Amino acid sequence: MGNFRGWEILVIVGLVILLFGAKKLPDMARSLGKSARILKSEAKAMKKDGESDDVAAAAPADQSAQQPVAPRTIQAAPGDVSSSRPVSEPNRTAQG
């Protein structure tokens, strides 16, 4: 990015506007923002799941009265109620 001069950046921006149209650019940016938020929340959830697995592995195995785990749900971005869906995770007790 440091090698571009001001007029070169303007030419690139102009080409992007010509290719996609000025009306599509805000929708594309909004979509990219939603995707980034979902990716960030999933990464946090995976990290949290990994930490809880470490704690569960350190706990004694003789606890037979464990509570059932509710299925996780991916939360939709604010204002987008149509994309939240349940996540099916593999059953770890059947592996071994």
Image (cartoon, grey):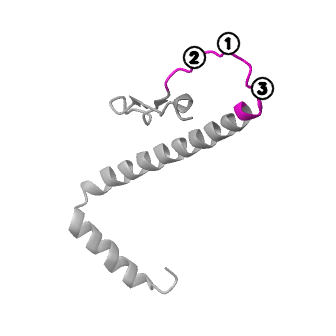
Q: Quadrant of the C terminus?
A: top right
Q: Is residue 90 above or below residue 65?
A: below
Q: Is residue 85 above or below residue 62?
A: below
Residue 88, quarter of picture:
top left
Q: Residue at x 53, y 35 (%)?
A: 95
Instruction: Provide the residue designation for mark 3.
Output: 60
Give x and y (percent) for residue 45: 57, 38
Q: Residue at x 22, y 69 (%)?
A: 18
Q: Which amino acid type corresponds to the residue marked 2 in the rendered image?
A: Pro
Q: Residue at x 74, y 20 (%)?
A: 62
Identify the residue at the far top of this view: 65
**Label 1 environment density (alpha carbons within 10 Å; few <14, some 14–19, many ≥20):** few
**Residue 39, label in figure:** none
Q: Is residue 12 left or right of residue 41?
A: left
Q: Which amino acid type corresponds to the residue marked 1 in the rendered image?
A: Ala
Work out whether residue 94 or residue 74 is closer to the camera in this orientation and state it: 94
| Residue 58 belongs to magenta span | yes
Identify the residue at the far front of this view: 96
The answer to whether marks 2 and 1 mark residues whose Cβ atoms lie closer than 8 Å is no
Instruction: Provide the residue designation for mark 1.
Output: 65
Work out whether residue 36 or residue 60 is closer to the camera in this orientation and state it: 60
Q: Which mark sits nearer the N-terminus, 3 or 1?
A: 3
**Residue 68, label in figure:** 2
The stretch of residues the image draws in magenta is 56-71
Q: Which amino acid type corresponds to the residue marked 3 in the rendered image?
A: Pro
| Residue 94 belongs to magenta span | no
